[in-house]
Amino acid sequence: MTPFPPGFLFGTSTSAHQVEGGQVNDWTEWEAITATQRARSARASSRYGQHPSPVWQAIKTAAKDPANYRSGRAADHYHRYEADLDIAASLGTNAYRFSVEWSRIEPKPGEFDQAALAHYVAVAKACRERGLEPLVTLWHFTFPRWLGEQGGWLAPGVENKFAVFAEVVTRALAPHVSMFTTLNEPEVASSLGYYLGIWPPGRRGLISYLRARRALVRGHIAAAQAIKAVKPDARVGFSASQIDFVTTIPFLRPFVEIAARLANDYFPARLHNHCDWIGAQYYFQRTLGRHRSAPNSDMGWGLHPEGHEAVLKRLARFHRPLYVTESGLADAADAHRAGYIEETLAAIDRAIADGVDCRGYLHWSLLDNFEWHEGFWPEFGLVHVDHATLRRTVRPSAREYAKLIAQLKSPTP
Ligand code: BGC
């Protein structure tokens, strides 16, 4: 691989609920209600009906423990962000994506907590001090309890509340942050929370799903306008979950395209005119016909890093600069991560060589964290976190990522 375009962001990604610890939001409510049941029903097979977990024997005890399903103190990143950012900088990364926690900032309707805002200003400044471009996500799956109780994305006027929140956050962060992500994976949030009902607010059915999707669209548009009103030069986007649909059977090819349109295009098609850029988040393929054999992640997701190329090429149809704002794998043994990252960067390189305007890659995740429905056992971190002691250990794959960054970063003029 030759050096990537000048200014390309090589980074890492996290989200508040998954790493900060000490949350009081709709997800912690959900955890309290569902932890026991989830522990009882834990099985080797994982979400999205992919393959059974290949490490089930090793993680069975953790998966059957209700404590696994409570985010609790998570990685205590809220208090340890400076040391964590030191690690991110030591790898040679130049960007860090994190989310601001709405429930901390607006714990009661219309009451904004200045200390919480000051915390995120400090995080953004700490990024800048270490040469990391901060990418701030406004909504990464969690609501304050008061808004969760009203139905989350089904709450009356939720898009206006989101816009006010966006405005308050932008006012505070404007001097330090240029890149904002309004929504993280609205595809996943709407299908798991409002169609399948396995995430909060636990709504099931087509009508709530369609309503939630429409509210998410309105939410992005309202928030993007609010951000621009405060900071006209802000660069606003959202992060789309993208699945790579493939088949080896020629007559199934048209169906692959139909599946990709249905699963991937709803939000980009409606939001690209309200975006300066789009985030691509790719974790797995879906195969029509026979699966191509590949190793599986600990969650049973087939590892197909080459799929980044097709996903980026499809998203390029929306004519916006792209950033891979998430990509990664649960791999506690760190057996596949380094190779996966290298092949991912090679796939991005091919897409760029073919004319795709991709400007960044942010690996999910900097730290082992709380993986939503599965809880703590899946380990996505470049940095291992011992959840008993909170001790950080940089994994060998992180060192390999650092080597690739050193090789691929364009020299600064
Ligand atoms: C989400 C992350 C999650 C990751 C791995 C994405 O769906 O944005 O919060 O941890 O995938 O499942």
Image: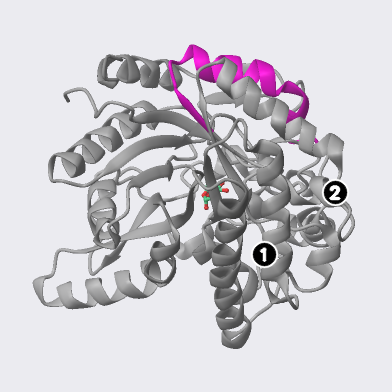
| Residue bearing the label numbered 1 | 199
The amino acid type found where label 2 is placed reads: Phe
Q: Relative to the observer, which residue lies in front, 216 or 198?
A: 216
Instruction: Specify start and end residues of the magenta stretch as a single range.
Output: 73-96
Q: Residue at x 29, y 29 (%)?
A: 342
Decide: is 191 above or below 50.
Answer: below
| 75 inside magenta stretch | yes
Count of numbered marks: 2
Q: Relative to the observer, which residue lies in front, 185 or 376?
A: 185
Q: Are marks 2 and 1 in contact (CB under 8 Å)?
A: no
Nearer to us: label 2 or label 1: 2
| Residue bearing the label numbered 2 | 112
Label 1 environment density (alpha carbons within 10 Å; few <14, some 14–19, many ≥20): many
Decide: is 156 above or below 224.
Answer: below
Label 2 environment density (alpha carbons within 10 Å; few <14, some 14–19, many ≥20): some
Decide: is 206 above or below 239.
Answer: below
The amino acid type found where label 1 is placed reads: Trp
Position in image of residue 296 (x %, y %): 38, 45
Mark 2 secondary-structure assignment: loop
Residue occupying the far bottom of the picture: 207
* Circle number at residue 234: none
Q: Quadrant of residue 174?
A: top right
